[in-house]
Image (tube, rainbow, N blue to C red):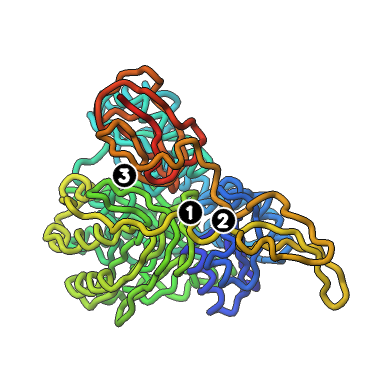
Amino acid sequence: MLNKVLIANRGEIAVRVIRACQEMGIATVAVYSDLDRDALHVRLADEAYALGGQTAAESYLNTEAILDVISRSGADAVHPGYGFFSENTDFARAITEIGVKFIGPPPEAIEVMGDKVSSRKAAEAAGVAGVPGTTEFLTDASEVIAFGEQHGWPVAIKAAYGGGGRGMRVVRSAEEAPDAFESAKSEALKGFGRDECYVERYLTWPRHIEMQIIGDTHGNCVWVAERDCSAQRRHQKLVEESPAPAFPAEIRQAMGDAAVKVAKACGYVNAGTVEFLYQDGEFYFLEMNTRLQVEHPVTEMVSGIDLVAEQIRVAAGEPLSFTQDSIELSGHAIEIRINAENPAEGKFLPSPGHITTLVPPAGFGTRWDGGYESGDTVSQFYDNLVGKLICWGEDRPTAIRRTLRALREFRIEGIATTIPADIAILEHADFQEARHSTKWVEDTLDLTGVAAAPSTGAEGDGEARVQRDVDVEVNGKRFAVKVFVPESQAGAVVAAGAVGASGGAAGARPRRSAASGGGAGAGGSGAVTVPMQGTIVKVLVEVGQDVEAGATVCVLEAMKMENNITAEKAGTVKEIKVAPGDSVGSGDVVVVIE
Protein backbone atom coordinates (compact mmCIF):
# COMPACT_ATOMS: atom_id res chain seq x y z
CA MET A 1 0.00 0.00 0.00
CA LEU A 2 1.06 3.58 -0.56
CA ASN A 3 2.41 5.62 2.36
CA LYS A 4 2.08 9.27 1.35
CA VAL A 5 0.03 10.78 -1.49
CA LEU A 6 0.49 14.25 -2.92
CA ILE A 7 -2.69 15.70 -4.40
CA ALA A 8 -1.76 17.88 -7.37
CA ASN A 9 -5.02 19.79 -7.38
CA ARG A 10 -7.27 22.07 -5.37
CA GLY A 11 -10.92 22.58 -4.43
CA GLU A 12 -13.43 19.85 -3.81
CA ILE A 13 -11.56 17.09 -5.65
CA ALA A 14 -8.45 17.66 -3.52
CA VAL A 15 -10.66 17.46 -0.43
CA ARG A 16 -12.29 14.26 -1.75
CA VAL A 17 -8.93 12.54 -2.30
CA ILE A 18 -7.53 13.71 1.04
CA ARG A 19 -10.49 12.21 2.88
CA ALA A 20 -10.18 8.88 1.05
CA CYS A 21 -6.47 8.68 1.85
CA GLN A 22 -6.99 9.49 5.50
CA GLU A 23 -9.64 6.77 5.78
CA MET A 24 -7.08 4.33 4.36
CA GLY A 25 -4.37 5.44 6.78
CA ILE A 26 -2.33 7.16 4.08
CA ALA A 27 -0.59 10.49 4.78
CA THR A 28 -1.58 13.41 2.52
CA VAL A 29 0.33 16.31 1.00
CA ALA A 30 -1.46 19.39 -0.33
CA VAL A 31 -0.03 22.02 -2.66
CA TYR A 32 -1.36 25.53 -2.97
CA SER A 33 -1.08 28.82 -4.82
CA ASP A 34 -0.79 32.20 -3.12
CA LEU A 35 -4.57 32.62 -3.37
CA ASP A 36 -5.23 29.19 -1.83
CA ARG A 37 -2.98 29.60 1.19
CA ASP A 38 -5.92 29.16 3.58
CA ALA A 39 -8.06 26.89 1.37
CA LEU A 40 -10.01 23.94 2.74
CA HIS A 41 -7.79 21.31 1.11
CA VAL A 42 -4.76 22.96 2.71
CA ARG A 43 -6.42 22.94 6.12
CA LEU A 44 -7.34 19.25 5.89
CA ALA A 45 -4.09 17.77 4.56
CA ASP A 46 -1.40 16.39 6.84
CA GLU A 47 1.22 18.57 5.12
CA ALA A 48 0.95 21.53 2.73
CA TYR A 49 3.52 23.21 0.48
CA ALA A 50 3.43 26.52 -1.37
CA LEU A 51 3.78 26.49 -5.16
CA GLY A 52 3.81 30.28 -5.50
CA GLY A 53 1.88 32.33 -8.03
CA GLN A 54 -1.81 33.08 -8.41
CA THR A 55 -2.97 31.75 -11.76
CA ALA A 56 -3.11 28.04 -12.58
CA ALA A 57 -0.15 28.41 -14.96
CA GLU A 58 1.96 29.90 -12.16
CA SER A 59 1.02 27.25 -9.61
CA TYR A 60 -0.98 24.09 -10.25
CA LEU A 61 0.41 23.79 -13.80
CA ASN A 62 4.01 24.36 -12.71
CA THR A 63 5.60 20.93 -13.15
CA GLU A 64 8.97 21.86 -11.65
CA ALA A 65 7.37 23.29 -8.52
CA ILE A 66 5.29 20.15 -8.00
CA LEU A 67 8.27 17.85 -8.58
CA ASP A 68 10.19 19.86 -6.01
CA VAL A 69 7.42 19.36 -3.45
CA ILE A 70 7.37 15.62 -4.16
CA SER A 71 11.08 15.49 -3.38
CA ARG A 72 10.81 17.62 -0.24
CA SER A 73 7.76 15.84 1.14
CA GLY A 74 8.84 12.27 0.38
CA ALA A 75 5.50 11.48 -1.28
CA ASP A 76 5.48 8.08 -2.99
CA ALA A 77 2.40 8.73 -5.14
CA VAL A 78 0.56 11.60 -6.84
CA HIS A 79 -3.18 11.87 -7.42
CA PRO A 80 -3.91 14.48 -10.13
CA GLY A 81 -7.66 14.81 -9.49
CA TYR A 82 -9.34 16.13 -12.64
CA GLY A 83 -8.47 19.14 -14.76
CA PHE A 84 -5.00 20.67 -14.49
CA PHE A 85 -2.44 17.87 -15.09
CA SER A 86 -4.82 14.90 -14.83
CA GLU A 87 -4.65 14.13 -18.56
CA ASN A 88 -1.17 15.48 -19.28
CA THR A 89 1.16 12.82 -20.64
CA ASP A 90 4.33 14.79 -19.91
CA PHE A 91 3.34 15.27 -16.28
CA ALA A 92 2.46 11.60 -15.82
CA ARG A 93 5.82 10.60 -17.31
CA ALA A 94 7.69 13.11 -15.15
CA ILE A 95 6.08 11.51 -12.08
CA THR A 96 6.74 7.91 -13.04
CA GLU A 97 10.30 8.62 -14.18
CA ILE A 98 11.31 9.62 -10.65
CA GLY A 99 9.91 6.38 -9.25
CA VAL A 100 6.68 7.86 -7.87
CA LYS A 101 3.29 6.23 -8.53
CA PHE A 102 0.86 8.15 -10.70
CA ILE A 103 -2.69 7.42 -9.50
CA GLY A 104 -4.15 7.27 -12.96
CA PRO A 105 -3.58 5.47 -16.25
CA PRO A 106 -0.18 4.80 -17.83
CA PRO A 107 1.22 7.76 -19.78
CA GLU A 108 0.81 5.74 -22.99
CA ALA A 109 -2.95 5.41 -22.41
CA ILE A 110 -3.25 9.13 -21.72
CA GLU A 111 -1.34 9.79 -24.92
CA VAL A 112 -3.82 7.76 -26.94
CA MET A 113 -7.04 8.69 -25.16
CA GLY A 114 -6.25 12.09 -23.67
CA ASP A 115 -5.97 13.39 -27.23
CA LYS A 116 -9.48 13.23 -28.65
CA VAL A 117 -8.29 12.77 -32.23
CA SER A 118 -6.14 9.71 -31.55
CA SER A 119 -8.84 8.38 -29.19
CA ARG A 120 -11.31 8.39 -32.09
CA LYS A 121 -8.87 6.31 -34.11
CA ALA A 122 -8.35 3.88 -31.21
CA ALA A 123 -12.11 3.50 -30.68
CA GLU A 124 -12.67 2.82 -34.36
CA ALA A 125 -9.89 0.22 -34.30
CA ALA A 126 -11.73 -1.44 -31.39
CA GLY A 127 -14.92 -1.52 -33.44
CA VAL A 128 -16.65 1.36 -31.66
CA ALA A 129 -17.93 4.06 -34.00
CA GLY A 130 -17.82 7.76 -33.18
CA VAL A 131 -19.60 10.86 -34.39
CA PRO A 132 -18.27 11.74 -37.88
CA GLY A 133 -15.29 14.06 -37.46
CA THR A 134 -11.68 14.74 -38.38
CA THR A 135 -8.87 12.46 -37.29
CA GLU A 136 -6.18 15.10 -37.71
CA PHE A 137 -5.64 18.36 -35.85
CA LEU A 138 -7.00 21.50 -37.47
CA THR A 139 -4.42 23.90 -38.87
CA ASP A 140 -6.71 26.50 -40.40
CA ALA A 141 -10.33 27.64 -40.32
CA SER A 142 -10.68 26.61 -43.97
CA GLU A 143 -10.66 22.97 -42.82
CA VAL A 144 -13.65 23.69 -40.57
CA ILE A 145 -15.46 25.24 -43.54
CA ALA A 146 -14.67 22.27 -45.79
CA PHE A 147 -15.95 19.83 -43.14
CA GLY A 148 -19.14 21.84 -42.65
CA GLU A 149 -19.82 22.02 -46.37
CA GLN A 150 -19.38 18.24 -46.64
CA HIS A 151 -21.28 17.08 -43.53
CA GLY A 152 -23.67 19.99 -43.05
CA TRP A 153 -23.93 22.74 -40.48
CA PRO A 154 -23.67 23.12 -37.54
CA VAL A 155 -20.32 21.57 -36.63
CA ALA A 156 -18.37 21.63 -33.37
CA ILE A 157 -14.73 22.67 -32.94
CA LYS A 158 -13.31 20.93 -29.86
CA ALA A 159 -10.11 21.11 -27.86
CA ALA A 160 -8.21 17.87 -28.44
CA TYR A 161 -6.68 17.88 -24.95
CA GLY A 162 -9.57 19.29 -22.96
CA GLY A 163 -13.06 18.71 -21.71
CA GLY A 164 -15.93 20.30 -19.81
CA GLY A 165 -16.92 22.42 -22.81
CA ARG A 166 -13.80 24.56 -22.62
CA GLY A 167 -12.20 25.13 -25.99
CA MET A 168 -15.44 24.11 -27.74
CA ARG A 169 -17.26 26.30 -30.24
CA VAL A 170 -20.40 25.46 -32.21
CA VAL A 171 -20.12 26.83 -35.77
CA ARG A 172 -23.33 27.34 -37.72
CA SER A 173 -21.95 28.81 -40.92
CA ALA A 174 -18.76 29.30 -42.89
CA GLU A 175 -18.71 32.97 -41.85
CA GLU A 176 -18.43 32.03 -38.16
CA ALA A 177 -15.56 29.59 -38.65
CA PRO A 178 -12.47 31.89 -38.47
CA ASP A 179 -13.45 33.63 -35.22
CA ALA A 180 -14.67 30.38 -33.66
CA PHE A 181 -11.44 28.60 -34.56
CA GLU A 182 -9.25 31.27 -32.96
CA SER A 183 -11.46 31.51 -29.87
CA ALA A 184 -11.47 27.72 -29.36
CA LYS A 185 -7.67 27.58 -29.63
CA SER A 186 -7.25 30.49 -27.21
CA GLU A 187 -9.54 29.01 -24.57
CA ALA A 188 -8.00 25.54 -24.95
CA LEU A 189 -4.50 26.91 -24.45
CA LYS A 190 -5.51 28.76 -21.27
CA GLY A 191 -7.42 25.82 -19.84
CA PHE A 192 -5.22 22.86 -20.80
CA GLY A 193 -1.86 24.21 -21.93
CA ARG A 194 -2.43 22.87 -25.48
CA ASP A 195 -4.34 24.54 -28.33
CA GLU A 196 -4.82 21.64 -30.76
CA CYS A 197 -8.42 21.29 -31.96
CA TYR A 198 -10.51 19.04 -34.21
CA VAL A 199 -13.99 19.29 -35.75
CA GLU A 200 -16.94 16.91 -35.76
CA ARG A 201 -20.62 16.76 -36.71
CA TYR A 202 -22.87 18.44 -34.17
CA LEU A 203 -25.88 16.25 -33.31
CA THR A 204 -29.18 18.09 -32.99
CA TRP A 205 -30.84 16.49 -29.94
CA PRO A 206 -28.51 13.95 -28.28
CA ARG A 207 -28.25 12.71 -24.74
CA HIS A 208 -24.83 12.55 -23.10
CA ILE A 209 -24.37 9.14 -21.51
CA GLU A 210 -21.05 7.92 -20.16
CA MET A 211 -19.69 4.68 -18.76
CA GLN A 212 -17.51 4.47 -15.66
CA ILE A 213 -14.77 1.90 -16.22
CA ILE A 214 -11.87 0.80 -14.08
CA GLY A 215 -9.04 -1.62 -14.80
CA ASP A 216 -6.11 -3.04 -12.85
CA THR A 217 -2.62 -4.28 -13.66
CA HIS A 218 -3.80 -7.91 -13.47
CA GLY A 219 -5.83 -7.79 -16.68
CA ASN A 220 -9.20 -7.02 -15.12
CA CYS A 221 -11.36 -4.25 -16.62
CA VAL A 222 -15.04 -3.65 -15.84
CA TRP A 223 -17.76 -1.09 -16.37
CA VAL A 224 -19.47 -0.06 -13.16
CA ALA A 225 -22.52 1.92 -14.27
CA GLU A 226 -23.62 4.58 -16.70
CA ARG A 227 -24.34 8.24 -15.97
CA ASP A 228 -26.69 10.57 -17.84
CA CYS A 229 -25.14 14.04 -18.03
CA SER A 230 -27.50 15.66 -20.54
CA ALA A 231 -28.52 18.72 -18.49
CA GLN A 232 -25.78 21.12 -19.61
CA ARG A 233 -25.14 24.75 -20.40
CA ARG A 234 -22.19 25.96 -22.46
CA HIS A 235 -21.45 22.24 -22.88
CA GLN A 236 -20.67 21.99 -19.19
CA LYS A 237 -22.72 19.68 -17.00
CA LEU A 238 -25.19 20.96 -14.43
CA VAL A 239 -26.98 17.77 -13.37
CA GLU A 240 -25.79 14.16 -13.58
CA GLU A 241 -27.61 10.98 -12.61
CA SER A 242 -27.26 7.21 -12.49
CA PRO A 243 -28.74 5.06 -13.86
CA ALA A 244 -29.71 6.86 -17.07
CA PRO A 245 -33.51 7.22 -17.26
CA ALA A 246 -35.53 5.86 -20.21
CA PHE A 247 -32.48 3.91 -21.32
CA PRO A 248 -33.04 0.40 -22.73
CA ALA A 249 -31.27 -2.44 -20.93
CA GLU A 250 -29.86 -3.85 -24.17
CA ILE A 251 -28.33 -0.45 -25.07
CA ARG A 252 -26.86 -0.20 -21.56
CA GLN A 253 -25.19 -3.58 -21.90
CA ALA A 254 -23.91 -2.83 -25.41
CA MET A 255 -22.54 0.54 -24.32
CA GLY A 256 -20.83 -1.00 -21.30
CA ASP A 257 -19.23 -3.66 -23.46
CA ALA A 258 -18.10 -0.99 -25.93
CA ALA A 259 -16.54 1.05 -23.13
CA VAL A 260 -14.50 -1.92 -21.94
CA LYS A 261 -13.38 -2.62 -25.53
CA VAL A 262 -12.15 0.96 -25.87
CA ALA A 263 -10.30 0.78 -22.54
CA LYS A 264 -8.62 -2.54 -23.32
CA ALA A 265 -7.63 -1.31 -26.78
CA CYS A 266 -5.28 1.23 -25.22
CA GLY A 267 -4.06 -0.86 -22.27
CA TYR A 268 -6.03 1.26 -19.83
CA VAL A 269 -5.44 0.91 -16.09
CA ASN A 270 -7.17 2.75 -13.22
CA ALA A 271 -10.44 4.71 -13.32
CA GLY A 272 -11.68 6.35 -16.48
CA THR A 273 -14.84 7.31 -18.31
CA VAL A 274 -15.89 6.51 -21.86
CA GLU A 275 -18.38 9.09 -23.09
CA PHE A 276 -21.06 8.53 -25.72
CA LEU A 277 -23.76 10.53 -27.46
CA TYR A 278 -27.10 8.70 -27.65
CA GLN A 279 -29.79 9.65 -30.14
CA ASP A 280 -32.65 7.76 -31.83
CA GLY A 281 -31.62 4.39 -30.40
CA GLU A 282 -28.00 4.68 -31.59
CA PHE A 283 -24.89 5.60 -29.61
CA TYR A 284 -21.60 7.09 -30.79
CA PHE A 285 -18.21 7.17 -29.11
CA LEU A 286 -17.46 10.76 -28.08
CA GLU A 287 -14.24 10.66 -26.09
CA MET A 288 -12.51 9.00 -23.19
CA ASN A 289 -11.63 10.94 -20.06
CA THR A 290 -8.47 9.36 -18.71
CA ARG A 291 -9.11 10.40 -15.14
CA LEU A 292 -11.67 10.47 -12.37
CA GLN A 293 -14.79 12.40 -13.39
CA VAL A 294 -16.43 15.24 -11.47
CA GLU A 295 -19.64 13.20 -11.40
CA HIS A 296 -18.13 9.99 -10.00
CA PRO A 297 -20.14 10.24 -6.72
CA VAL A 298 -23.43 9.25 -8.40
CA THR A 299 -21.80 5.98 -9.44
CA GLU A 300 -20.52 5.50 -5.91
CA MET A 301 -23.97 6.11 -4.46
CA VAL A 302 -25.70 3.44 -6.57
CA SER A 303 -22.85 0.89 -6.54
CA GLY A 304 -21.45 1.29 -3.02
CA ILE A 305 -17.93 1.32 -4.49
CA ASP A 306 -15.45 3.98 -3.31
CA LEU A 307 -13.84 4.78 -6.66
CA VAL A 308 -11.06 6.93 -5.19
CA ALA A 309 -10.04 4.21 -2.76
CA GLU A 310 -10.14 1.72 -5.63
CA GLN A 311 -7.90 4.04 -7.69
CA ILE A 312 -5.35 4.06 -4.89
CA ARG A 313 -5.40 0.28 -4.52
CA VAL A 314 -4.92 -0.21 -8.26
CA ALA A 315 -2.00 2.23 -8.28
CA ALA A 316 -0.44 0.22 -5.47
CA GLY A 317 -0.58 -2.90 -7.66
CA GLU A 318 -3.58 -4.58 -6.06
CA PRO A 319 -6.31 -6.28 -8.14
CA LEU A 320 -9.83 -4.85 -8.27
CA SER A 321 -11.82 -5.70 -5.17
CA PHE A 322 -14.83 -6.70 -7.29
CA THR A 323 -15.68 -8.34 -10.61
CA GLN A 324 -18.14 -7.46 -13.36
CA ASP A 325 -20.62 -10.03 -12.08
CA SER A 326 -20.35 -8.94 -8.43
CA ILE A 327 -21.42 -5.33 -9.08
CA GLU A 328 -24.88 -4.69 -7.67
CA LEU A 329 -26.63 -1.39 -8.32
CA SER A 330 -29.32 -0.01 -6.03
CA GLY A 331 -31.69 2.92 -6.38
CA HIS A 332 -31.07 6.19 -8.19
CA ALA A 333 -28.60 9.03 -7.54
CA ILE A 334 -28.56 12.64 -8.76
CA GLU A 335 -25.62 15.03 -8.56
CA ILE A 336 -26.01 18.81 -8.71
CA ARG A 337 -22.94 20.90 -9.45
CA ILE A 338 -23.12 24.01 -7.31
CA ASN A 339 -21.21 26.57 -9.38
CA ALA A 340 -20.35 30.17 -8.53
CA GLU A 341 -22.52 31.48 -11.34
CA ASN A 342 -25.62 33.61 -11.54
CA PRO A 343 -28.19 31.88 -13.79
CA ALA A 344 -29.19 35.41 -14.88
CA GLU A 345 -32.17 34.16 -16.88
CA GLY A 346 -30.00 31.75 -18.86
CA LYS A 347 -26.79 33.79 -19.22
CA PHE A 348 -24.96 31.88 -16.42
CA LEU A 349 -22.52 34.63 -15.46
CA PRO A 350 -19.46 33.72 -13.37
CA SER A 351 -19.73 35.01 -9.80
CA PRO A 352 -16.41 34.84 -7.96
CA GLY A 353 -16.33 36.32 -4.49
CA HIS A 354 -16.20 35.86 -0.73
CA ILE A 355 -18.51 33.24 0.77
CA THR A 356 -19.97 34.74 3.91
CA THR A 357 -22.15 31.71 4.75
CA LEU A 358 -22.10 28.11 3.55
CA VAL A 359 -24.29 25.58 5.32
CA PRO A 360 -24.89 22.47 3.19
CA PRO A 361 -28.05 20.39 3.60
CA ALA A 362 -28.12 17.11 5.48
CA GLY A 363 -30.45 14.17 5.92
CA PHE A 364 -30.92 10.62 4.70
CA GLY A 365 -29.34 9.91 1.32
CA THR A 366 -27.76 13.37 1.13
CA ARG A 367 -24.03 13.93 0.48
CA TRP A 368 -22.03 17.14 0.05
CA ASP A 369 -18.60 17.10 -1.61
CA GLY A 370 -17.40 20.67 -1.20
CA GLY A 371 -14.19 22.60 -1.62
CA TYR A 372 -15.15 25.66 0.40
CA GLU A 373 -16.56 26.64 3.76
CA SER A 374 -17.94 29.85 5.23
CA GLY A 375 -15.32 32.59 5.04
CA ASP A 376 -13.53 31.17 1.98
CA THR A 377 -13.09 33.02 -1.31
CA VAL A 378 -13.89 31.74 -4.80
CA SER A 379 -11.24 33.23 -7.08
CA GLN A 380 -11.75 34.35 -10.66
CA PHE A 381 -8.53 32.52 -11.58
CA TYR A 382 -9.89 29.00 -11.08
CA ASP A 383 -12.84 26.79 -11.95
CA ASN A 384 -16.15 27.98 -10.52
CA LEU A 385 -17.22 24.68 -8.95
CA VAL A 386 -18.00 25.26 -5.27
CA GLY A 387 -19.03 21.68 -4.64
CA LYS A 388 -21.42 18.88 -5.50
CA LEU A 389 -24.69 17.89 -3.88
CA ILE A 390 -25.49 14.20 -4.36
CA CYS A 391 -28.79 12.67 -3.32
CA TRP A 392 -29.87 9.02 -3.41
CA GLY A 393 -33.38 7.58 -3.54
CA GLU A 394 -34.88 4.14 -3.94
CA ASP A 395 -36.14 5.28 -7.35
CA ARG A 396 -35.78 8.33 -9.61
CA PRO A 397 -38.89 10.23 -8.39
CA THR A 398 -37.70 9.86 -4.80
CA ALA A 399 -34.21 11.03 -5.73
CA ILE A 400 -35.65 14.09 -7.52
CA ARG A 401 -37.82 15.04 -4.54
CA ARG A 402 -34.94 14.56 -2.10
CA THR A 403 -32.64 16.68 -4.25
CA LEU A 404 -35.19 19.48 -4.47
CA ARG A 405 -35.60 19.42 -0.70
CA ALA A 406 -31.86 19.59 -0.21
CA LEU A 407 -31.41 22.44 -2.71
CA ARG A 408 -34.03 24.53 -0.92
CA GLU A 409 -32.34 23.79 2.39
CA PHE A 410 -28.90 24.82 1.13
CA ARG A 411 -27.63 28.13 2.58
CA ILE A 412 -24.87 29.87 0.66
CA GLU A 413 -24.43 33.64 0.79
CA GLY A 414 -21.91 36.15 -0.53
CA ILE A 415 -21.77 34.70 -4.04
CA ALA A 416 -24.39 33.86 -6.62
CA THR A 417 -24.83 30.17 -7.44
CA THR A 418 -26.62 27.98 -9.96
CA ILE A 419 -29.08 26.65 -7.35
CA PRO A 420 -32.12 28.56 -8.73
CA ALA A 421 -31.49 27.07 -12.18
CA ASP A 422 -30.97 23.62 -10.69
CA ILE A 423 -34.38 23.80 -9.02
CA ALA A 424 -35.98 24.93 -12.29
CA ILE A 425 -34.42 21.96 -14.09
CA LEU A 426 -35.56 19.34 -11.56
CA GLU A 427 -39.09 20.77 -11.38
CA HIS A 428 -39.59 20.75 -15.16
CA ALA A 429 -41.76 18.02 -16.68
CA ASP A 430 -39.23 17.44 -19.48
CA PHE A 431 -36.55 16.50 -16.98
CA GLN A 432 -38.86 14.44 -14.81
CA GLU A 433 -40.02 12.50 -17.87
CA ALA A 434 -36.48 12.26 -19.35
CA ARG A 435 -37.30 14.21 -22.50
CA HIS A 436 -34.27 16.49 -22.20
CA SER A 437 -31.04 16.51 -24.22
CA THR A 438 -27.69 18.30 -24.15
CA LYS A 439 -29.39 21.22 -25.96
CA TRP A 440 -32.43 21.37 -23.70
CA VAL A 441 -31.24 23.86 -21.05
CA GLU A 442 -30.20 26.45 -23.63
CA ASP A 443 -32.83 25.81 -26.30
CA THR A 444 -35.99 24.87 -24.37
CA LEU A 445 -35.78 25.55 -20.63
CA ASP A 446 -37.40 28.89 -19.83
CA LEU A 447 -35.30 30.62 -17.16
CA THR A 448 -37.14 33.92 -17.36
CA GLY A 449 -37.02 35.48 -13.91
CA VAL A 450 -34.58 32.83 -12.64
CA ALA A 451 -31.57 34.53 -11.12
CA ALA A 452 -29.54 34.40 -7.95
CA ALA A 453 -29.97 37.02 -5.26
CA PRO A 454 -27.50 39.91 -5.60
CA SER A 455 -24.09 39.02 -4.23
CA THR A 456 -23.33 40.59 -0.89
CA GLY A 457 -19.60 40.19 -1.30
CA ALA A 458 -16.85 40.39 -3.86
CA GLU A 459 -13.55 38.66 -4.19
CA GLY A 460 -11.28 39.97 -1.50
CA ASP A 461 -14.05 40.90 0.93
CA GLY A 462 -12.16 38.63 3.27
CA GLU A 463 -9.45 41.02 4.38
CA ALA A 464 -6.33 40.83 2.20
CA ARG A 465 -3.27 39.31 3.83
CA VAL A 466 0.19 40.75 3.41
CA GLN A 467 3.57 39.09 3.77
CA ARG A 468 5.99 39.99 6.52
CA ASP A 469 9.47 38.50 6.88
CA VAL A 470 10.19 37.93 10.56
CA ASP A 471 13.09 36.49 12.55
CA VAL A 472 11.98 34.20 15.37
CA GLU A 473 13.66 31.99 17.94
CA VAL A 474 12.50 28.44 18.69
CA ASN A 475 14.26 26.73 21.62
CA GLY A 476 17.09 29.20 21.24
CA LYS A 477 17.54 28.62 17.49
CA ARG A 478 17.03 31.52 15.13
CA PHE A 479 14.81 31.13 12.04
CA ALA A 480 13.81 33.53 9.27
CA VAL A 481 10.13 32.93 8.47
CA LYS A 482 7.38 34.43 6.36
CA VAL A 483 4.07 35.25 8.01
CA PHE A 484 0.86 36.31 6.29
CA VAL A 485 -1.33 38.56 8.38
CA PRO A 486 -4.49 40.63 7.82
CA GLU A 487 -3.55 43.98 6.31
CA SER A 488 -5.02 45.85 9.27
CA GLN A 489 -2.68 43.99 11.65
CA ALA A 490 0.47 44.17 9.56
CA GLY A 491 1.88 47.09 11.49
CA ALA A 492 1.56 45.17 14.73
CA VAL A 493 3.85 42.38 13.60
CA VAL A 494 7.07 43.23 15.42
CA ALA A 495 10.02 40.98 16.14
CA ALA A 496 13.67 41.48 16.84
CA GLY A 497 15.42 42.06 13.54
CA ALA A 498 12.12 41.91 11.66
CA VAL A 499 12.29 42.99 8.06
CA GLY A 500 9.57 45.08 6.43
CA ALA A 501 7.15 43.86 3.82
CA SER A 502 8.85 41.81 1.15
CA GLY A 503 7.16 41.34 -2.17
CA GLY A 504 4.05 43.36 -1.43
CA ALA A 505 0.59 42.01 -0.74
CA ALA A 506 0.98 38.36 -1.68
CA GLY A 507 -2.69 37.64 -1.18
CA ALA A 508 -4.07 40.90 -2.46
CA ARG A 509 -6.42 41.34 -5.37
CA PRO A 510 -4.92 41.55 -8.89
CA ARG A 511 -4.24 44.86 -10.60
CA ARG A 512 -7.40 46.69 -11.51
CA SER A 513 -7.74 48.66 -14.70
CA ALA A 514 -8.73 52.28 -15.09
CA ALA A 515 -12.30 51.04 -15.35
CA SER A 516 -12.43 50.49 -11.60
CA GLY A 517 -14.79 52.72 -9.76
CA GLY A 518 -16.61 53.61 -12.91
CA GLY A 519 -19.86 52.34 -11.49
CA ALA A 520 -22.40 50.01 -13.06
CA GLY A 521 -23.87 52.37 -15.58
CA ALA A 522 -26.82 50.96 -17.49
CA GLY A 523 -25.94 49.58 -20.88
CA GLY A 524 -28.72 51.68 -22.43
CA SER A 525 -26.97 54.85 -21.29
CA GLY A 526 -23.96 54.03 -23.43
CA ALA A 527 -21.71 52.93 -20.57
CA VAL A 528 -20.87 49.29 -21.32
CA THR A 529 -20.21 47.47 -18.04
CA VAL A 530 -18.99 43.99 -17.20
CA PRO A 531 -21.34 41.73 -15.20
CA MET A 532 -18.58 39.88 -13.39
CA GLN A 533 -15.01 40.04 -12.17
CA GLY A 534 -12.39 38.86 -14.65
CA THR A 535 -9.56 39.71 -17.03
CA ILE A 536 -9.90 41.47 -20.38
CA VAL A 537 -8.65 39.16 -23.15
CA LYS A 538 -9.48 41.18 -26.27
CA VAL A 539 -10.75 44.65 -27.14
CA LEU A 540 -12.62 44.50 -30.45
CA VAL A 541 -13.48 48.16 -31.05
CA GLU A 542 -11.63 51.44 -31.53
CA VAL A 543 -12.42 55.02 -30.52
CA GLY A 544 -14.53 56.60 -33.23
CA GLN A 545 -15.90 53.29 -34.48
CA ASP A 546 -19.64 52.93 -35.10
CA VAL A 547 -21.20 49.88 -33.43
CA GLU A 548 -24.63 48.29 -33.53
CA ALA A 549 -26.63 47.19 -30.49
CA GLY A 550 -25.54 43.68 -29.53
CA ALA A 551 -22.06 44.02 -31.04
CA THR A 552 -19.20 42.53 -29.01
CA VAL A 553 -16.89 45.27 -27.76
CA CYS A 554 -14.49 43.12 -25.73
CA VAL A 555 -13.93 39.58 -24.44
CA LEU A 556 -13.71 38.94 -20.70
CA GLU A 557 -12.15 35.81 -19.23
CA ALA A 558 -13.51 34.68 -15.86
CA MET A 559 -13.11 31.29 -14.23
CA LYS A 560 -11.39 29.89 -17.34
CA MET A 561 -14.32 30.83 -19.60
CA GLU A 562 -14.43 33.56 -22.25
CA ASN A 563 -17.47 35.86 -22.20
CA ASN A 564 -18.47 38.36 -24.87
CA ILE A 565 -19.29 41.84 -23.53
CA THR A 566 -21.76 43.51 -25.85
CA ALA A 567 -23.11 47.00 -26.48
CA GLU A 568 -26.75 47.52 -25.53
CA LYS A 569 -27.20 50.53 -27.80
CA ALA A 570 -25.97 51.60 -31.20
CA GLY A 571 -23.63 54.55 -31.48
CA THR A 572 -20.02 55.68 -31.75
CA VAL A 573 -17.27 54.53 -29.39
CA LYS A 574 -16.26 57.59 -27.39
CA GLU A 575 -13.86 56.02 -24.88
CA ILE A 576 -12.17 52.67 -24.21
CA LYS A 577 -11.28 52.29 -20.55
CA VAL A 578 -9.51 48.91 -20.64
CA ALA A 579 -6.76 47.05 -22.46
CA PRO A 580 -5.98 43.32 -22.81
CA GLY A 581 -4.64 41.97 -19.53
CA ASP A 582 -6.53 44.43 -17.33
CA SER A 583 -8.48 43.03 -14.37
CA VAL A 584 -11.97 44.41 -13.89
CA GLY A 585 -14.70 44.01 -11.31
CA SER A 586 -18.44 43.54 -11.60
CA GLY A 587 -20.06 46.79 -12.75
CA ASP A 588 -16.86 48.37 -14.09
CA VAL A 589 -17.27 50.47 -17.24
CA VAL A 590 -15.11 49.19 -20.11
CA VAL A 591 -16.39 51.16 -23.12
CA VAL A 592 -18.41 54.35 -23.47
CA ILE A 593 -20.71 54.75 -26.49
CA GLU A 594 -22.48 57.94 -27.51
How many C-alpha atoms fall within 10 Å of the one at disc 3: few (<14), some, or many (≥20)? some
Comparing 99 with 240, the one in front is 240
Q: Counting residues from the N terminus, which is met first, the one under dot 2 or under dot 1?
A: 2
Residue 5: x percent and y percent? 61, 67
Q: Measure the C-alpha gap from mark 2 to mark 3.
A: 44 Å
Contact, CB < 8 Å: mark 3 with mark 1? no
Using the rendered view, name the quadrant where residue 326 is placed: bottom left
Name which residue type carries label 3: Ala
For residue 129, the mark is 3
- Secondary structure of residue under mark 3: loop
Instruction: Please state, as top left, top right, bottom left or bottom right, where the C terminus lies in the image.
Output: top left
On the question of residue 40 being in view, the answer is yes
Name the residue rendered at 55%, 42% in the picture: 511
Total numbered badges shown on the rendered structure: 3
449 vs 545, left or right, is: left
User: Left or right: 79 with respect to 571?
Assistant: right
User: Which dot, 2 or 3, sits closer to the camera?
Assistant: 2
Q: Is residue 435 above or below residue 336?
A: above
The residue wearing badge 1 is: 379
**Which residue is nearer to you in this view: 97 or 447?**
447
Amino acid type of the residue that numbered disc 1 sits on in the rendered structure: Ser
**Rendered location of residue 263, percent (x, y):** 43, 55
Q: Secondary structure at mark 1?
A: loop
